[in-house]
């Protein structure tokens, strides 16, 4: 029975908010969440307070949904871990098969689960064990290879699912199979193969008596359980063969003893790896355990080839061809003295494991290595689930910051929970890469945000990165180099900031977008900059036209020199440009010797740099001189000498 939540008060907004929090804490049913808003409405409070309570109710409902999703995912992963431990402890084949079907029913919450095993001699697959079935005919049905959903899975070694089997034309229907399905009342069916290497030994099913669609997560979950099931079935089969060999073949006692030792070692190692994951170990712990058990050096990479962990081995990329071969065959493969095993969840590639220093890996150790890939898959699935949740929360916060969609104090509080302090200076970066998918650039930005305690996400179909920084220009240049190396193509970055507090992020984002557009228009691909780095282009594009700052940035060295030495190089520079950059005409206008003009221009070159007479640089200088001249004529303060 659901817990009855007592109302802490009636009619008061604070009491309604407290009531919502109590409902969340105690896991109240969905219908209870409308009561606080109803009570406030009945109390005839003002419209703004009633609206706030209504909005708080919607937030509470979203939090409740998120918590429910988290609890469901945690329960699924915990059940998978329990399954690994339980199956490793079982030795009897019938007990293993019953445990598999029962655990599949608990994990997916379906009406029926069942398992069929292949009969190589008869060339078909037969029902071996069921959970939740009521039809005797269904429990005894046999499926020829390619017949029905199960026969197609057994023949193709691929998962298949149907929302309503009876009306699905993809499958080869037979009278025997269809009548058994009708008698059992099944509609929606999901089947995944039980594989040992490239060989399919059977099919694991989950079915409902009403039409429905199985989600990709459910398919991946049942596939992971099927991988465990195949290993457990194989272990039970090998144990039976060992016991039979001990009775019948006394002369092979040494071979059988060695085989038993290998099996015990494999089981112990599997239990050790499973226990490590259950205790919260990370990928580095798994890599260390694999290296210790197999007496080799270990590398673990993700699906993109990024290194996740390395123990003892030198850095090296995963061999793509070996990973593809292992993925297709479902077994570890050797390449140049290194064993490689794909880490899979169903057909999805999660990464790969490489073992070096053990070119002579025996069959038992090879299977142990393959078992380690299953445990690694569980760990990576858990890690991905946590990362996806955190990335979604960070992306939502970034979107609200850039659109001012929430109260500033609320944004600051949400950021603090993510260990992001908006009271420190932050810079907004907008990223662009021409030749790669946007999701790949986003993934690299997310990794950068994690290392720098920032935020990253998509906004208006653009990749946006927010990082702690008080120097936008330098940080943008460094990030452009870093991300260009990470994605192997030029990355262009427009920056704006720094900003302190959540109020100014939207304006900074707009400025960063303008900066990025200017960089691309000017052909500066693969670089990072702020508007201040773009000279007069930045002045024209900026929200606040800082003419004084532009003059200081462009002519600052000359202004300081004239102030300190009492000279007038500014006037010489003005006359030189007015004379069409002719030294002779400048001498005449200044009424000085030609050598004096040359000396002054040399000094100007030392102060401004050797490229000061290039057309684009000369344009910048002339514009700054004209702004300084107009500002002085208008009575405004002259550019600072600082």
Image (tube, rainbow, N blue to C red):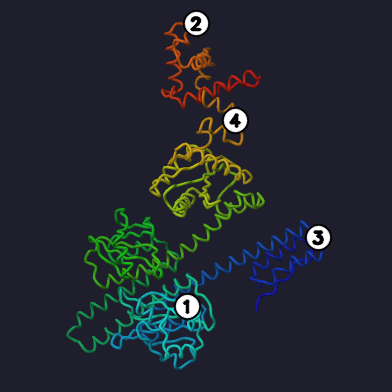
Q: Residue furthest right?
A: 44
How far across and how far down the image is residue 93, in percent? 36, 85
Q: Which residue is mark 3?
A: 45
Label 2 packing within 10 angstroms: few (<14), some (14-19), many (20+): few
Mark in the foreground, 4 or 2: 2
Which type of secondary structure does the marked residue at label 2 adopt?
loop
Mark in the foreground, 4 or 1: 1
Label 4 packing within 10 angstroms: few (<14), some (14-19), many (20+): few
Q: Which residue is mark 4?
A: 546
Measured Cα–Cα span from mark 3 to mark 2: 84 Å
Q: Which residue is mark 2?
A: 591
Quadrant assignment for the N terminus: bottom right
Which type of secondary structure does the marked residue at label 1 adopt?
strand
Q: Which residue is mark 1?
A: 162
Quadrant assignment for the C terminus: top right
Mark in the foreground, 1 or 3: 1
Whether the residues at callouts 4 and 2 have beta carbons within 8 Å, the answer is: no
């Amino acid at each position: 029975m659901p817990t009855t939540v007592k109302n802490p008060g009636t009619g008061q907004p604070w009491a309604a908010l407290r009531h919502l929090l109590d409902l969340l804490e105690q896991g109240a049913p969905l219908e209870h969440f409308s009561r606080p808003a109803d009570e406030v409405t009945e109390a005839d409070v003002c419209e703004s307070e009633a609206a706030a309570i209504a909005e708080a109710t919607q937030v509470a409902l979203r939090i409740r949904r998120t918590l429910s999703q988290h609890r469901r995912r945690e329960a699924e992963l915990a059940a998978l871990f329990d399954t690994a431990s339980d199956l490793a402890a079982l030795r009897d084949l019938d007990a293993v098969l019953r445990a598999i079907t029962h655990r599949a029913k608990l994990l997916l919450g379906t009406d029926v689960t069942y398992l069929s095993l292949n009969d190589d001699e008869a060339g078909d697959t037969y029902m071996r064990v069921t959970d939740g079935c009521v039809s005797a005919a269904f429990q005894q049905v046999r499926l020829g290879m390619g017949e029905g959903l199960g026969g197609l899975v057994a023949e193709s070694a691929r998962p298949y699912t149907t929302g309503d089997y009876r009306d699905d034309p993809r499958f080869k229907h037979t009278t025997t199979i269809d009548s058994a399905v009708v008698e059992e009342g099944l509609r929606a069916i999901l089947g995944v193969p039980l594989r040992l290497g490239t060989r399919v030994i059977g099919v694991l099913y989950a079915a409902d008596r009403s039409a429905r669609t199985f989600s990709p997560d459910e398919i991946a979950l049942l596939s992971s359980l099927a991988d465990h099931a195949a290993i457990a079935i194989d272990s039970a089969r090998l144990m039976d063969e060992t016991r039979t060999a001990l009775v019948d073949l006394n002369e092979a006692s040494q071979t059988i003893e060695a085989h038993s030792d290998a099996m015990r070692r494999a089981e112990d190692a599997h239990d050790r790896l499973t226990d490590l994951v259950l205790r919260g170990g990370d990928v580095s712990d798994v890599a260390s355990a694999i290296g210790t058990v197999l007496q080799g050096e270990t590398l673990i990479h993700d699906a993109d080839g990024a290194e996740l962990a390395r123990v003892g081995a030198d850095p090296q990329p995963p061999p793509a061809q070996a990973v593809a071969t292992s993925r297709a065959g479902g077994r570890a493969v050797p390449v140049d003295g290194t064993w490689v095993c794909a880490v899979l969840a169903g057909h999805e590639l999660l990464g790969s494991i490489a073992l070096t220093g053990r070119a002579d890996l025996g069959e038992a150790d090879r299977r142990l290595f393959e078992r380690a890939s299953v445990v690694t898959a569980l760990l990576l699935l858990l890690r991905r689930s946590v990362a996806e949740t955190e990335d979604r929360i960070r992306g939502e916060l970034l979107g609200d910051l850039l659109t001012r969609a929430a109260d500033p104090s609320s944004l600051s509080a949400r950021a603090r929970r993510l260990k992001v302090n908006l009271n420190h200076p932050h810079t907004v970066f907008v990223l662009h890469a021409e030749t790669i998918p946007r999701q790949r650039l986003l993934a690299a930005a997310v990794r950068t945000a994690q290392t720098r305690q920032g935020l990253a996400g998509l906004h208006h179909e653009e990749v946006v990165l927010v990082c702690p920084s008080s120097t936008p220009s330098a940080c943008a240049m460094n990030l452009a180099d870093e991300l260009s190396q990470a994605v192997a193509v030029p990355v262009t970055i427009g920056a704006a900031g720094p900003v302190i507090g959540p109020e100014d992020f939207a304006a900074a984002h707009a400025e960063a977008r303008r900066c990025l557009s200017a960089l691309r228009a000017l052909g500066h691909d693969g670089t990072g900059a702020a508007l201040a780095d773009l000279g007069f282009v930045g002045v024209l594009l900026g929200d606040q036209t800082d003419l004084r700052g532009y003059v200081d940035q462009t002519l600052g060295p000359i202004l300081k020199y004239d102030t300190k030495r009492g000279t007038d190089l500014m006037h010489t520079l003005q006359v030189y440009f007015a004379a069409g950059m002719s030294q002779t005409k400048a001498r005449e206008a200044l009424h000085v010797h030609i050598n004096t003009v040359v000396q002054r221009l040399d000094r100007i070159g030392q102060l401004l740099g050797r490229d000061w007479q290039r057309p684009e640089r000369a344009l910048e200088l002339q514009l700054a001189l004209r702004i300084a001249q107009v500002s002085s004529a208008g009575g405004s303060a002259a550019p600072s000498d600082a």
